[in-house]
Amino acid sequence: MAERIGFIGLGIMGRGMAHNLLKAGFPLRVWNRTASRMQGLIDAGAEAGDSPADVAAHSDITITCVSDTPDVEKVILGEDGVIHGAKQGALVVDCSTISPQVTKEIAAKLAEKGIHMLDAPISGGSEGAAKGTLSIMVGGDAEQFERAKPAFQAMGKTITHIGPAGAGQTVKLVNQVLVVGNCLAMCEALLLAQAGEVDLQKTFDAISQGAAGSWMFTNRAPQIIRRDWRPGFTVALQQKDLRLVLDAADELGVPLPGTSLIFQLYRTLEARGLQEEGNHALIKALEALSQIEVGASA
């Protein structure tokens, strides 16, 4: 019989992930800070929880997918947190992207109560969450990883057990360095194409399947060409992840000059109130420097 799943955090990623767990046949109980976001899942057959603690009390495995380190601490360790509802032997799986160090601290506090934890951050954007094709990088006990695997397989396609607690979060930060590096390369390339007055769609067609192609270019370049800023991942969340990257790099004494530059370019977008646009809006920082608008002639 499938283990009962609790899901906390029904944002841009969590909503699709929770729907895929339902489709896979898992009994599901959900909670979200903004209660209205639960309605679609309740209509699809999920039960509504009253609090994170209530969700955990009715679940064998509780999955959290919220915005930032303090949010994870609150829903797991806070007043009505998972720790107060989860039974001994239960498993908590955090799919948020947060500090690797804080992840280890949360795991230790749960372990004191006999509760297991995996850190399982995700990559693949809202599209991957909806389609169940996410990449999931997991830290924690190997036995608990095997236990959670059926749930992971409902949500993702590439599922990798990296190592002990915190290892999943560290690899997610590595992932984000590549994401923003690819994003900046894409934006610079499209800016050059626009300045050179070549057809942007034909440029995309010529390049996307070759050596310069990438997930970022395939999925986000068409949006830039259309001036479509709907987020698969917001500027605000991208910046939160980059703060974590730069904090970790600082702790480890690792120079990340390119990533640091991209963080500052995103900061100019934050200053203009563009936090909720997609992370591909990075092009707007380059447009401001060059006074060239990509896609303007389309």
Image: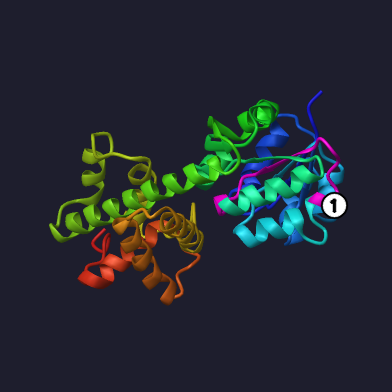
Q: Which of the pair 217/56 is nearer the observer?
A: 56
Main structural element of the magenta stretch: helix, strand or loop?
loop
Q: Would residue 125 be found to the left or right of residue 21 on screen?
A: left
Relative to residue 95, is residue 298 depicted above or below? below
Q: Residue 180: percent from the left, percent from the top?
A: 37, 53
Residue at the image position 44 percent from the left and 72 percent from the top: 270
Query: Quarter of the image containing the N terminus?
Result: top right
- Residue 295 forms part of the magenta stretch: no
Which range of residues does the magenta coloring cover? Answer: 83-100
Q: Would residue 192 be found to the left or right of residue 251 on screen?
A: left
Q: Residue 3: percent from the left, percent from the top?
A: 79, 30
Residue at the image position 67 percent from the left and 32 percent from the top: 151
User: Label 1 belongs to which residue?
Assistant: 84
Query: Quarter of the image containing the C terminus?
Result: bottom left
Q: Which of the pair 192/80 is nearer the observer?
A: 80
Give the structural element (helix, strand or loop) at label 1. Answer: helix
Residue at the image position 48 percent from the left and 42 percent from the top: 171
Q: Amino acid at mark 1?
A: His
